[in-house]
Amino acid sequence: MLIREELEQIVKAAIQAAIDDGALAMEEVPDCALERPRDEGHGDWASTVAMRAAKAAGKNPRDIAQIIVDHLPQDSIISQCEIAGPGFINFTLKNEGKGSIPEGMRKVNIEYISANPTGPFHVGHGRWAALGDATARVMRHAGYDIYEEFYINDNGKQMDVFAESVVVRYLQLLGQKVELPEDCYAGAYVKDIAQAIIDEDGDAWVNADEAERLVNFRERAYAYELAEQHRICDTFGTTFDLWFSERTLYEPGEDGKSAIDAALEAMDKAGYLYEKEGALWFRSTDFKDDKDRVLRKSDGAYTYFMSDMAYHYNKMQRGFDHLIDIWGADHHGYIARCQAMLAAWGYEGALEVMLGQLVNLFRDGKPVRMSKRTGEMVTFEELMDEVGVDATRWIMLSRSADQMVDFDIEVAKKQDATNPVYYVQYAHARICSILRKAAGNEEAMLDSVAPAEVDLGLLTHESELALMRKMDVFPELVEQAARDRAAFRFTHYAQELAALFHAFYTQCHVMTEDAELTNARLALCDAVRTVLALSLSLLGISAPERM
């Protein structure tokens, strides 16, 4: 249980106890309203519950605060309570309570996409890009310390297979009769890489040493695809704090040890390694995995899981408190062993895995599986090129990560109310137009109308009240969406807020003969504009001022 939730339960129990014995005459236990004090000298947490309960209890807030404190259990995580100001209750926690880092204060590493640098991103990678980026945006806005990371799978057999594929295409383009092996990469992009090498080096590699050629082509092909991945992520508006190379896990550090060595040494000290039939095993069954896992095979080669193990250990050694990985749904069976390895090092519960379901592509309701351009799979870049970044992001985020997305390309391209992202963006643009009109300037909007400077009591129409009620829940939505890793909720929220604004615009004239009413409605419009823009921003979607 998170420390905040535990403290909330303690405070609620105290209030309920006070109600039960008649000290507080209330029907319901109010929200505890816990928050972090601005001044560290005021304790670890503060509650305004006494002030919130004053009207219902019919008592002075400080008296209510004292009653709550008097009913707190003696044996809890609370070390000290102080009643301050008009009725704040400041809580100082015992050391064991402070040991649990509050959810919103942990340093969080979010790793996503993490595709092999051996080919173009597919549409599924696009969804994971949207999920990871939006999750990071929402959590960061909610106050989390977020670090975004891309794990480059640049070590292992697939890199040599990729290089061999380029070699074959290179020789074929130069007239050599060479067959492409079944396990090679056959995409048109491999020919593009081979042609680029020909443009630079001509036929210099036709009769070269095969081992030297393979290494040269592998590194050039790798660099080409990695640059493509960077470019596409930039186009999508997704940025990473670190692109972490798997290869570096095997490179010795200043102490002569690699990340692989460090992870194995720590696991061995914990007592969870053993040898059997010449292989090195991790006793993951001690942590509810269905079987033990091989880390180093009998031929001395490390397994893919060994790289993952060292990588996650490396993350924790870099000072992160919590790890979030976004994987494809087909990796479900991989979760238990990865959580087991962290538990073995003493980091139980540190790894959270979000599984992103795949995307079903349609065009006018009919399934799309092949690219018109190449006759192969539709790539993420092709989808972005056709429908745009904003529409791509919106649809990828329209459902929770554990639900499949049906992506109709033609619907995404429509510029009318049937396209939800257009509908929301149009509401924002319409408000901007109103504010330009109010300013009497088609080049600039009216300066923000501060609600404190207008009489909001004039806003009595049901459509106005509905807008204010909707905006009032936004802060809570941010907190809950961050906690639940549910950025998709902002697509629903923004659509609902836009619908309420369109209804208001139809039913109420903004510019009226009553100057005070006009100013109140302009302030309302400007507030809606701000919340719509922020909602779109948390999804990584633009908020155009003109459409």
Image (cartoon, rainbow, N blue to C red):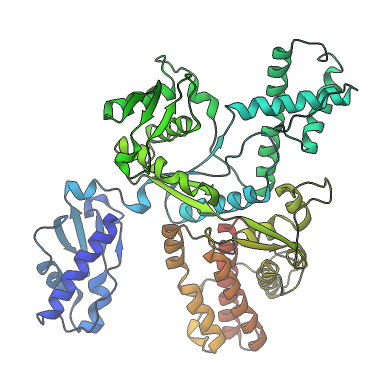
164 or 224: nearer the eye? Answer: 164
Q: Is residue 151 above or below residue 486?
A: above
Which residue is at 78% across, 67% downward?
Answer: 364
Q: How many marks?
A: 0
Please identify the residue farthest to the right as the structure is shown.
175
Please identify the residue farthest to the front as the structure is shown.
277
**x%, y% of residue 286?**
29, 40
118 or 58: nearer the eye? Answer: 118
328 or 37: nearer the eye? Answer: 328
The N terminus, quarter of image: bottom left
Which residue is at 76% across, 58% downward?
Answer: 368
Which corner quadrant of the image does residue 229 belong to? Answer: top right
**x%, y% of residue 283?**
33, 34
Q: Is residue 116 left or right of residue 81?
A: right
Query: Can the viewer see residue 544 in this picture?
Result: no
Q: Is residue 60 above or below residue 136?
A: below
Which corner quadrant of the image does residue 526 belong to? Answer: bottom right
The C terminus, quarter of image: bottom right
Q: Is residue 32 above or below residue 260?
A: below
381 or 377: nearer the eye? Answer: 377
**x%, y% of residue 324?**
45, 46
Query: Can the viewer see residue 366 in this picture?
Result: yes
**x%, y% of residue 149?**
52, 39
Which residue is at 77% across, 23% downward?
Answer: 167
